[in-house]
Image (cartoon, rainbow, N blue to C red):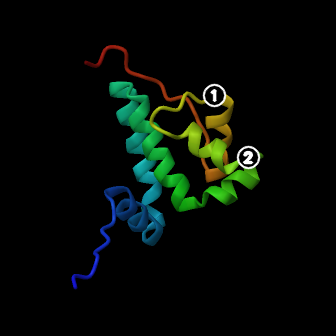
Amino acid sequence: MTKERFYKTLDENEEEYYRNHPDEIDEYLIIAFEEYAKDGCTAALLAQLHMIAGVKGVTALSQETGMTRNGIQKALSENGNPKFESINAIINAMGYRLAPQRLDVHAK
């Protein structure tokens, strides 16, 4: 009789990595937002924020934001269309803030 094997998904591996290396989350988020600024791929940014929300704990974020766990997961899903206020609240609960950064309009 063959024993059934369970394999972790890439997301599960990534989440575990950042749980074990929380000091690297800052750089991860900086890169995520830089990539979003370049390509405008909302689905990718939301997926990255969803993974970090898992690391930080969706229940804890839910309590801090006043949003439901389901609401956070839906907002950060690849097909999510969250309000700006929701993203701001989630980012703040993660311990970050959204802040403008001047662009060099002449750089290409």
Q: Residue at x 46, y 52 (%)?
A: 51
Identify the image quadrant of the N terminus.
Answer: bottom left
Residues marked 2 and 1 touching at CB (< 8 Å): no
The residue that appears at 62% across and 44% down in the rendered structure is 72
Q: Quadrant of the C terminus?
A: top left
Residue located at (47% from left, 68% from top)? 19
How many angstroms separate mark 2 from mark 1 (CA)? 13 Å
Determine the secondary structure under disc 1.
Answer: helix
Q: Is residue 35 above or below residue 50?
A: above
Residue nearest the observer in this picture, 51 or 37:
51
Q: Residue at x 43, y 37 (%)?
A: 45
The residue positioned farthest toward the left in the image shown: 2
Instruction: Say left or right for 24 vs 86.
Output: left
Check disc 2 and report its element: helix, strand or loop: helix
Q: Which mark is residue 84?
A: 1
Label 2 sits on what residue type? Thr
